[in-house]
Image (cartoon, helix red, strand yellow):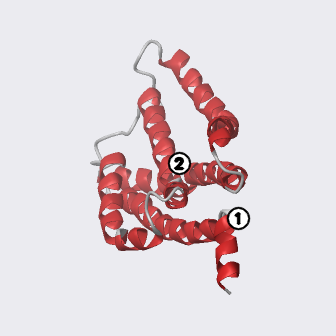
């Protein structure tokens, strides 16, 4: 690692500190967002708050860990193989850190797909059947997002797109489960009244 900018030795620790602060504060921020929305929700909908805050935080951390432990090693070794023998790789530490933080955020946000699916389905924006029929379009969308966000190599694109597709399926399953367990009391009473 080298520092080509005069302020890089000062800026790099600050960027690392900001990312660490963001990760530590993430559960509190998510809880505050849900606490802001909660007064407008029915009591049966408030059951969503704690599971979604916890699962959002865990999924973001899993995305960051997946990026760090699985993707980086593969991407960096693949990129180094394309370098000519006469080229010595000495990346600038600020450019390297910016790349790493961008990948952390990209994978963290990508792993939030099940949460987005559950929220959209539970709020009635889309139905489970619509989510299933959108599956093919989502696969294309996942690969387009992966191609834009990740470096121009197939390994990192697949490492982002494939988990997004799998997490979309997990989101459909979780949405069905959440809708079943957070029904309004009158919805649960209707089948009993018919029998």
Of tags 1 and 2, the one toward the viewer is 1
Q: Residue at x 45, y 61 (%)?
A: 164
| Residue 81 visible in the current orientation | no
| Residue 7 visible in the current orientation | yes
Disc 2 secondary structure class: helix
Residue 5 placement: quadrant: top left
Q: Residues within 10 Å of mark 1 (few under 14, many from 20)?
A: few
The alpha-carbon separation of the residues under discs 1 and 2 comes to: 35 Å
Q: Which mark is residue 139?
A: none
Outermost residue toward the bottom? 195
Which of 80 and 121 lies nearest the eye of the viewer? 121
Q: On the image, numbered disc 1 is attached to which residue?
A: 185
Outermost residue toward the top? 6
Which of 137 and 175 lies nearest the eye of the viewer? 175
Q: Residue at x 48, y 40 (%)?
A: 100
Which of 6 and 147 lies nearest the eye of the viewer? 147
Which of 101 and 191 lies nearest the eye of the viewer? 191
Q: Judge whether 35 appears above or below 180 on screen.
A: above
Q: Residue at x 47, y 29 (%)?
A: 93
Q: Give residue 126's position: percent from left, percent from top.
A: 43, 62
Q: Give residue 113's position: percent from left, percent from top.
A: 49, 57
Q: Is residue 126 left or right of residue 184?
A: left
Q: Are marks 1 and 2 in contact (CB under 8 Å)?
A: no
Q: Residues within 10 Å of mark 2 (few under 14, many from 20)?
A: many
Q: Give residue 131's position: percent from left, percent from top.
A: 42, 68
Q: Give residue 102's position: percent from left, percent from top.
A: 45, 39
Q: Judge whether 119 appears above or below 170 on screen.
A: above
Q: Which mark is residue 108?
A: 2
Please identify the quadrant where the C terminus is shown.
Answer: bottom right
């Amino acid at each position: 690692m080298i520092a080509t900018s005069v302020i890089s030795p000062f800026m790099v620790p600050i960027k690392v500190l900001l990312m660490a602060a963001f990760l530590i504060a993430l559960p509190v921020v998510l809880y505050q967002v849900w606490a802001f929305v909660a007064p407008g929700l029915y009591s049966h909908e408030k059951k969503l708050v704690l599971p979604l805050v916890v699962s959002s935080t865990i999924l973001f951390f899993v995305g960051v860990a997946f990026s760090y432990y699985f993707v980086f090693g593969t991407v960096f070794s693949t990129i180094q193989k394309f370098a000519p023998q006469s080229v010595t790789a000495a990346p600038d530490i600020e450019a390297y850190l910016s790349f790493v933080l961008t990948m952390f955020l990209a994978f963290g946000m990508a792993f939030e797909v099940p949460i987005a699916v559950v929220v959209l389905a539970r709020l009635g924006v889309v139905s489970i059947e619509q989510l299933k029929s959108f599956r093919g379009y989502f696969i294309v969308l996942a690969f387009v997002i992966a191609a834009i966000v990740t470096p121009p190599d197939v390994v990192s694109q697949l490492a982002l797109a494939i988990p997004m597709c799998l997490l979309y399926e997990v989101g459909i399953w979780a949405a069905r489960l959440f809708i079943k367990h957070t029904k309004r009391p009158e919805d649960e009473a209707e089948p009993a009244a018919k029998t």
